[in-house]
Image (cartoon, helix red, strand yellow):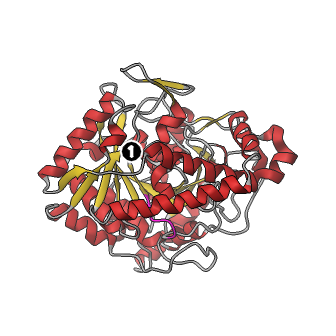
Amino acid sequence: MAAALRKGDLRPTEVVEAALARLHALEPTLNAFVTVTEDQARAAAQRLETALARGEAGALAGVPVAFKDLFETAGVRTTGGSHVLADYVPTRDATAVRRLLAADAVSLGKTTTHEFAFGPTTDSPYLGPTRNPWNPDHVPAGSSGGSGAAVAAGIVPLALGTDTGGSVRMPAAACGVVGLKPTYGRVSKFGVLPLSWSLDHVGPLARSVADAALALRLLAGGDPLDPSTVPIPPDDYQHAVRRGREETLRGLRIGVPTAWLDTRVDPDVRAAFDTALDVLRELGATVEPADLPPADVMTLVNRLITMGEAGAYHADLLRRFADQYAPDVRARLEVAQFITARDYLTGQRLRGELAREMALVMQTFDAIATPTMPIPAPRIGQQRWRYPDGQEEAVQEAMIRFVAPFSVSGQPALSVPCGFTPHGLPVGLQLVGRPFEERTILRIGAAYEAATPWHTQHP
């Protein structure tokens, strides 16, 4: 789309009007937006008509985008998906927002989130449930569910989300789009309402690996306003995508944590994943078993750190506005008040040990592959998942089991569509790389995408 706009094949005003029309047609069903900035979008599109004619426009000139409602947006309310901040209107843009707008993207508004990003279903009594474009009886996952649904439904080709325990990658998998969690420190979190300072990541959801790569190029880089960012220049991510499309994967070793897959994986998800591994082998990659730390242990560490940091951030708000929180989030935050400093520091110590273990594993492998989620998108309101062998698991526990570990290790992780269940629900393939080597997983993802039809299928 960006290329067509620059060449004059499309006009920003036409693109934005089409996007707004689709948004209004689908929003009564999807409930993907909290706030629609219609007037601002039209004004920006009109301004870009002139800028494009002068050859002065940025890389995303005229491209409609959306931002999860955790990103501060100057003059536009930022609610965090909560009654608590229903009237909060920031005076500044988050760094990630500013960088996309500086590239002349056109914001259509703010997308829904599980309240304060503290849940994987994007369902709350304040906003109501956001629905999966493939089947409105199912969740889009979360907590960036509105961004995932908006991209999958073709409202915008690009949206931003946050990922603390999988909240970019889960909606990508559930909605059949691409989701990228960059390395921790690669993209600034300044101006993003926090869930867990030391685990929060910012990343794009997009229709293709190439679009995610372009977004990362614009987002990446140090930020003096966020001390956690690392001032490493971004790679040529688009070159990595071209390599993936044009070359084999010969010489790359991909590890599969077979112990993670022994139990509690839906058979339809497992079948799609196994087929995806066959495609990677056909593309020339070597696919071998990998011995990773237990997923349940890494997920527990993620939960311990998240609870400690979220409990601290919300302590005062919870005392003042407890009755305005959603019941599920309020319950988690009330439990979080009992996390001690010793508990929290133990979690951070274990995080360091697990990151070192992962670094040793990555000396052998260029990437790790897993299903993004071990189950497809559950039904709205579904609490338990029953596997064919009779085991049961809380839906929220199942959804995060393969994604939360890599928020703990801080490694870059990419989810790409890899098929559908017999009921028509998307399945995601997760590719995990070495820290600050997003180019490798983008190359593998682009190669897989070029060899399969899944990214071309839309609801």
* Vertical position of residue 317 compared to residue 331: above or below: below
Q: Position of residue 438 (x, y in %)?
A: 36, 66
Q: What percent of the width, then of the height, locates residue 173? A: 40, 43
- The image shows residue 123, relative to residue 407, as above or below, that is above
- The N terminus is located in which quarter? bottom left
Q: Residue at x 13, y 62 (%)?
A: 250
Instruction: Give the quadrant of residue 260.
Output: top left
**What amino acid is at disc 1?**
Thr
Q: Which quadrant does the C terminus fall into?
A: top left
Residue in the picture at 84% in, 44% down = 321
Please tell me whether residue 6 is drawn above or below residue 343 in the rendered image.
below
Q: Is residue 76 left or right of residue 167?
A: right
As rendered, which of 20 and 193 lies closer to the eye? 193
Magenta stretch: dominant secondary structure: loop
Question: Is residue 51 at least partly visible in the picture?
Answer: yes
- The number of numbered badges drawn on the structure is 1
Residue range corresponding to the magenta coloring: 181-185
Left or right, residue 9 beside residue 375:
left
261, 67: nearer the viewer? 261
Q: Position of residue 446 (x, y in %)?
A: 26, 58
At x 69%, y 40%, the residue is 332
SS type, badge 1: loop
Q: What residue did someone put label 1 on?
A: 372
Residue at point 65% right, 59% down?
A: 345
Instruction: Confirm whether the magenta stretch covers residue 239.
Output: no
On the picture, is 44 further left or further right than 288?
A: right
Residue 436 drawn above or below residue 450: below
Residue 184 sits inside the magenta stretch: yes
- Mark 1 Cα within 10 Å, few/some/many (few <14, many 20+)? many
Residue 422, percent across and down? 30, 25
- Does residue 22 appear in the picture of this structure? no
